Amino acid sequence: MPTQFPESIFGTNVTRSPLAGQENPILARGFVADTLIAVPKGFRPVDQIAVGDLVETLDCGPQAVRAVRRQLVAGHGDAAPVLFEAGSIGNERPIMVSPNHRILINDWRAELWMGCDEMLVSAKDLVNGRDVRVIEGGLTAFVSLSFDESQIIYAGGCPFECRAEDEAEDMMFPRTAAAFPEVACLMAA
């Protein structure tokens, strides 16, 4: 059973993977807890967004959040967060995300890598060791948001992907089921 952390420290529903320090089997795409997300009246830290709250999206305007997942993971290896220093991707302040969180890029990289105007790229694929780095060590609280449909939302002024609720579940299910067979039947229901 995952360890629950006090609400006063990390917010509600934050769990630590029982395998923290090894592989983090439930790791979803997400933002570090204090990342500012665009909402209709400004910005709000992602860890203060709840189910039903409206978030600004690139293509569909304000959309209601359908699920909020919080997870505390050991920030090592595949689970170490990626730090985008201010200005590295058009952001005004540093942003940290999970390594698999995808950002929409529409600059020379999209043209060079794929011959297109824009593309979604995992944060880990943008690491350059200078202004985009992996930050190893400690525990990291990640927060992921899901919507009725996949959306591009703005975090720190930059466009990041958030998966649809059913896609987010599908993405996490195989690894979670393998690590926790006793809960696989509950997740499939």
Image: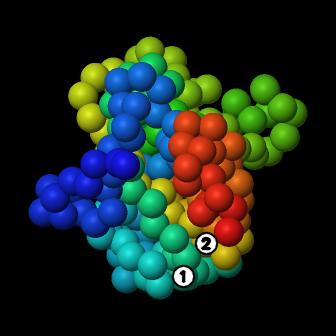
Choose top left, top right, bottom left or bottom right for residue 163: bottom right
The residue shown at (33%, 63%) is: 13
Q: Looking at the image, is 54 positioned above or below residue 109? A: below
Residue 29 seen in this snapshot = no
Residue where numbered disc 2 is placed: 147
> Badge 1: how crowded within 10 Å, few (<14), some, or many (20+)?
some
Tag 1's secondary structure? strand
Distance CA(mark 1)–CA(mark 2): 7 Å
Answer left or right for 3 relative to 186: left
Residue 74's spot in the image, x, y percent?
A: 33, 31
Q: Is residue 167 left or right of residue 184?
A: right
Disc on res. 56: none
Query: Residue 64, which numbered label?
Result: 1
Say what amino acid the circle numbered 2 marks. Phe
- Residue 159: x and y in percent read 57, 55
Q: Residue at x 87, y 33 (%)?
A: 115
Which residue is located at x 28 percent, y 48 percent? 3
Q: Amino acid at mark 1?
A: Ala
What colour scheme has been applied to the protein in the rendered image?
rainbow
Residue 46 is situated, as x and y percent measured from the top left of the image, at 36, 62
The residue lying at 37 percent from left, 49 percent from top is 1
Marks 1,2: beta carbons within 8 A: yes
Horizontal and vertical percent for residue 68? 46, 66
How many neighbours does mark 2 have within 10 angstroms: few (below 14), some (14-19), or many (20 or more)?
many
Mark 2 secondary-structure assignment: loop
In the image, residue 161 sits, relative to residue 140, either above or below, namely: below
Which is more N-terminal, label 2 or label 1?
A: 1
Quadrant of res 34: bottom left
Q: Can residue 181 be seen from the camera position used here?
A: yes
